[in-house]
Image: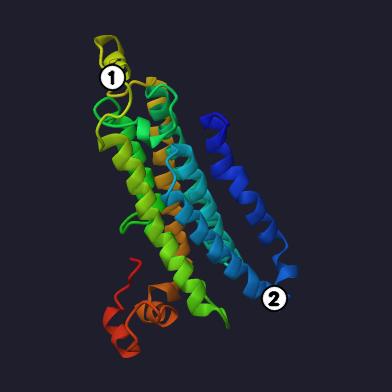
């Protein structure tokens, strides 16, 4: 992660993620002829998602946390691509690409503010000087970690609707489920240790940026064009993702049946399938 932040935002949101997934989708008519493909790729994807998420939890470098988060999301994408769920994969690419790019740009402004230190142990109480970056980064991380009522929650729920494995079914689902939970922990590390923890850098750093010369009327010490660009990226992501998800749900009427959702995920939900009809009110609506 020695590249500049704009290069990292491009690589980890678009090129690095979509290259391997594109090859899987492009050659899927050939790969699906192999039974080994349908067993090995979901297992490798679930394991990759778990290892990437677990590694991100124990990193102290801001950009490395997002980098290992990208590895975890690559595992999710490979897991979806192994079942031929092309529409789900493309929607996940939209969600991850937009919000990960915006998160990298917010982190870049934070690193620039704390005098080019990428270590969480050098940051602290940044929300007072960078409230714009705090709200933007918080919104992006909530979507990437998959908390309820955000885009990441609905797109990650599609991971559990495509498990058609004959063996390793419960093991892969367990890895995917734990990997989804790790996103909450490394997102918390970024938000807490960067914005709310006590001051850990040299006193001169905070005295320098707390002076009147560095206070901005626009609630950010970065350039106003940077804040506008990040806001435009987030608004575009929300609009396109909501639009694509709306048309996806219209074409997949079976997803709104919660009984179907329970049957596909009996490992984590109640085993009495008759109770599923009580929840048949359109979970995804």
Mark 2 and mark 1 lie on one chain; the one further toward the N terminus is 2
Q: Residue at x 56, y 79 (%)?
A: 165
Where residue 191 appears, as percent x and y from the top left, is 32, 41
Q: Is mark 2 on a helix, strand or loop?
A: helix
Q: Is residue 151 visible?
A: no
| Count of residue discs | 2
Q: Residue at x 50, y 75 (%)?
A: 171
Q: Which residue is drawn at 37% across and 46% down?
A: 141
Q: In this view, does 266 lie above or below 61?
A: below
Residue 268 located left or right of residue 43: left
Residue 119 or 147: which is nearer the viewer? Answer: 119
- What residue does disc 1 label? 203
Q: Quadrant of the N terminus?
A: top right
Q: Which residue is drawn at 40% across and 77% down?
A: 261
Q: Is residue 19 above or below residue 274?
A: above
Q: Quadrant of the C terminus?
A: bottom left
- What residue does disc 2 label? 36
Q: Can you tell which mark lies on residue 280?
A: none
Where residue 58 appears, as percent x and y from the top left, is 42, 49
Residue 151 figure quarter:
bottom left
Looking at the image, is mark 2 or mark 1 nearer the viewer?
1
Disc 2 crowd rating (10 Å Cα; few below 14, some 14-19, many 20+) is few
Q: Is residue 113 visible?
A: yes
């Amino acid at each position: 992660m020695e590249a500049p932040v704009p290069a990292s935002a491009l690589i980890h949101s678009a090129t690095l993620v979509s290259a391997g997934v594109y090859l899987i989708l492009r050659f899927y008519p050939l790969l699906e002829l192999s039974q080994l493909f349908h067993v090995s790729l979901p297992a490798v994807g679930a394991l990759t998602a778990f290892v990437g998420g677990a590694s991100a939890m124990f990193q102290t470098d801001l950009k490395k946390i997002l980098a290992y988060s990208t590895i975890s999301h690559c595992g999710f994408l490979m897991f979806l691509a192994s079942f031929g769920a092309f529409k789900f994969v493309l929607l996940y690419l939209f969600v991850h690409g937009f919000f990960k790019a915006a998160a990298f740009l917010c982190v870049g402004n934070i690193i620039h503010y704390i005098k080019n230190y990428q270590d969480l142990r050098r940051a602290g109480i940044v929300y007072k000087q960078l409230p714009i970056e705090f709200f933007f980064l918080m919104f992006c991380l909530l979507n990437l970690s998959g908390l309820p009522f955000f885009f990441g929650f609905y797109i990650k729920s599609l991971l559990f609707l495509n498990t058609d494995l004959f063996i390793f079914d419960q093991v892969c689902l367990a890895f995917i489920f734990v990997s989804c939970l790790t996103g909450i922990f490394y997102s918390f590390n970024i938000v807490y240790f960067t914005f709310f923890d006590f001051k850990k850098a040299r006193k001169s750093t905070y005295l320098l940026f707390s002076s009147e010369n560095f206070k901005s009327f626009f609630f950010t010490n970065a350039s106003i064009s940077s804040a506008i660009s990040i806001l435009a990226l987030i608004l575009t992501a929300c609009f396109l993702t909501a639009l694509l998800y709306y048309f996806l749900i219209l074409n997949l009427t079976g997803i709104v049946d919660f009984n179907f959702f329970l049957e596909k995920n009996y490992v984590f939900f109640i085993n009495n399938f008759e109770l599923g009809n009580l929840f048949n009110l359109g979970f995804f609506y």
